[in-house]
């Protein structure tokens, strides 16, 4: 991230507070949400803004997540700007409505504070909730730090409500490591945010539910209609890639911060080896890369910021011609030899001009992706680049997975 | 130069707020601060650990701290717990909330010990045994990394009215009354 022109209004706040403040700055008409660890603070803050009159929206304190998503879907389809927030089991409990929102092409914006979701109920960080909903038909964006949480929520509205896109957007950030992280965030002025979002008012008006007027949404004809709607969904998703890049550039012009669009490249220009990661781990990876660079190790990072649609063109462009690539997953994909993002990237291996790929699984169930772990990943990726025999998948914090052949 | 601080306490003592106020105070001096706690469900009385990184350069690491150079112990019952000293770097310092003039807390890497009766001061000033704002004042004095002024300014982001005034006194008393011993 480059900070160039923005004046400093630094406040030390958490990732959750950054999400709530961004929602406030976007001036939604309706917020409906239900609290869940580690997202609760988002709702607390929004409730405080609402109670003090700072936030002029309809705040619906529902009895559960399913109602939250249904409420914002209805409000969105009626033409309102909406916001909600959830995590893990909350996302599971609203899942049918999550799908319905996507099917109806309702431009809902929400944050999902990443938390583990397996049946062994864990109150701990992990991206399994994101992975398990990856093809629900939403655009997925992932933040690395508190500033990026705020910035991505604002950008999400530009993406969701764009006339050419009209898709729901979920901004993901790591529970615990980011939701509770307090750090300096440049909070923009309301008028600057208003200016950034004002272009949405100048576009053609989308079709909305109107009292007294008949309109069906999220429904289809008997035969061809379904295919047509699904294909249009796919093409809108694909269009969102270039749109997100455009929004990032425009954001830079107004706020003085750019992240690079679908992916952020960190010291990749002359790198032989690259780690691919997403979310809060990327900050730690960058700090280790700086240390390793001083020792002459030519390592870089490609950070996935847009995960759905999968940014394969941007990833191939960034990774092509490297010797070895280590992909770090904070979640699992069953039946594959490697994590979910690794598996997806593997589909584009033949376009990488001979770059080899390995998978690292780490950071699930709150295990910490430590600097030591990142150093180990870089060492193994280096071994792969040197033609040594390296296992395809390594559970970095769980050596038994790699040695014992555990059953 | 980055300081890595680990905070040990229990839910309800304001461990998380301690680490937040310090990050806030550092940001006010043009430096950088980042802090976060680690716990499962929020509940009073359960052990809570928090981490703080304070630096003249932006802090990007988002991991727990395994090799702190500063320890802050808000819960006196944990002062001799083995895990409190885990990974302490040589030349390390420790700030302890304890009413006793503790001289039995020692570790081979501990070079500076600071003790403050934060619970006692908090009881006197705010009527509650919540030691956090005394501790932030004492931290400024012990570490030498902060003046008391940015700490007092930071408090205004977390308290208002009478509570703010009482907590300002707590922080000042922490700064003035902490006893520092070089080991």
Image (cartoon, coloured by chain):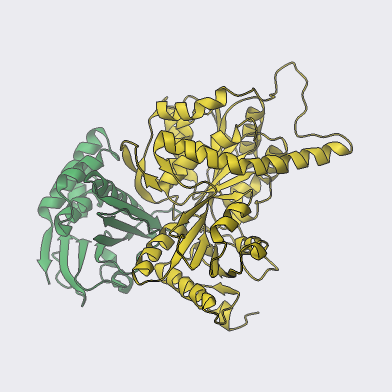
Chain colours: A yellow, B green
Hey, which quadrant is residue B149 in on the image?
top left
A217 sits left or right of B126 in the view: right
Quarter of the rendering occupied by the C terminus of chain B: bottom left
Hey, which quadrant is residue A65 in on the image?
top right
Q: Is residue A26 visible?
A: yes
Tell which residue pokes out farthest to the right in this image.
Answer: A223
Point 27% across, 71% down: residue:
B88
Point 52% across, 37% down: residue:
A247
| Residue A175, x across and y down, in percent | 49, 53
Quarter of the rendering occupied by the N terminus of chain B: bottom left
Give A219 or B166, whichever is nearer the viewer: A219
Point 33% across, 55% down: residue:
B59
| Residue B134, x across and y down, in percent | 20, 50
Give B122 or A96, whichever is nearer the viewer: A96
A244 sits left or right of B113 in the view: right
| Residue B142, x across and y down, in percent | 15, 58
């Amino acid at each position: 991230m480059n900070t160039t022109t923005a004046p400093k209004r630094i406040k030390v706040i958490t990732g959750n507070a950054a999400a709530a403040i961004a929602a406030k700055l976007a001036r939604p008409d309706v917020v409906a949400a239900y609290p869940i660890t580690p997202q609760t603070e988002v709702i607390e803050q929004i409730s405080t803004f609402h109670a003090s009159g700072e936030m002029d929206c309809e705040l619906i304190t529902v009895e559960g997540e399913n109602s939250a998503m249904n409420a914002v879907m209805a409000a969105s389809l009626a033409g309102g700007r909406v916001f909600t927030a959830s995590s893990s089991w909350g996302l599971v409990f609203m899942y049918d409505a999550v799908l319905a929102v996507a099917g109806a092409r309702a431009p809902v914006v929400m944050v999902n504070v990443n938390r583990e979701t397996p049946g062994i109920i864990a109150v701990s960080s992990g991206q399994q909730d994101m992975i398990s909903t990856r093809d629900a038909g939403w655009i997925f964006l992932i933040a690395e730090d508190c500033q990026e949480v705020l910035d991505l929520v604002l950008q999400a509205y530009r993406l969701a409500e764009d006339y050419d896109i009209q898709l729901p957007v979920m901004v993901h950030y790591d529970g615990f490591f980011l939701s509770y992280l307090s750090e300096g965030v440049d909070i923009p002025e309301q008028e600057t945010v208003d200016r950034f979002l004002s272009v949405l008012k100048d576009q053609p008006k989308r079709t909305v539910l109107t009292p007294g007027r008949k309109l069906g949404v999220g429904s289809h004809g008997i035969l061809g209609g379904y295919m047509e709607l699904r294909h249009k969904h796919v093409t809108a998703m694909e269009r969102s890639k270039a749109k997100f890049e455009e929004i990032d550039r425009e954001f830079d012009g107004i706020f003085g911060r750019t992240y690079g669009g679908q992916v952020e490249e960190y010291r990749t220009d002359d790198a032989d080896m690259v780690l691919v990661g997403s979310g809060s781990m990327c900050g730690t990876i960058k700090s280790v890369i700086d240390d390793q660079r001083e020792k002459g190790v030519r390592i870089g990072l490609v950070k996935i910021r847009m995960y759905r649609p999968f940014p394969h063109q941007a990833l191939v462009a960034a990774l092509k011609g490297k010797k070895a690539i280590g992909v770090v997953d904070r979640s699992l994909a069953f039946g594959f030899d490697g994590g979910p993002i690794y598996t997806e990237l593997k589909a584009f291996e033949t376009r990488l001009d001979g770059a080899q790929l390995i998978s690292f699984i780490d950071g699930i169930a709150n295990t910490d992706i430590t600097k030591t772990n990142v150093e180990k990943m870089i060492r193994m990726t280096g071994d792969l680049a040197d033609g040594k025999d390296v296992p395809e998948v390594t559970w970095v914090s769980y050596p038994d997975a790699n040695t014992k052949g555990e059953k | 130069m980055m300081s890595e601080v680990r905070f040990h306490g229990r839910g309800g003592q304001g461990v998380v707020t301690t680490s937040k106020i310090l990050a806030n105070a550092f940001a006010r001096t043009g430096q950088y601060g980042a802090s976060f706690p680690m716990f499962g469900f929020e509940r009073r009385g359960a052990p809570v650990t928090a981490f703080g990184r304070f630096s003249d350069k932006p802090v990007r690491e988002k991991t727990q701290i395994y090799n702190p150079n500063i320890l802050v112990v808000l819960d006196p019952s944990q002062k001799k717990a083995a895990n409190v000293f885990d990974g302490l770097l040589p030349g390390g310092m420790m700030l302890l909330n304890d009413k006793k003039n503790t001289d039995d807390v020692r570790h081979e890497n501990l070079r500076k010990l600071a003790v403050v009766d934060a619970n006692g001061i908090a009881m006197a000033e705010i009527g509650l045994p919540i030691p956090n704002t005394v501790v932030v004042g004492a931290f400024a004095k012990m570490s030498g990394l902060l003046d008391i002024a940015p700490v007092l300014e930071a408090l205004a982001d977390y308290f208002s009215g009478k509570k703010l005034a009482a907590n300002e006194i707590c922080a000042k008393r922490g700064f003035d009354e902490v006893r520092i011993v070089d080991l």
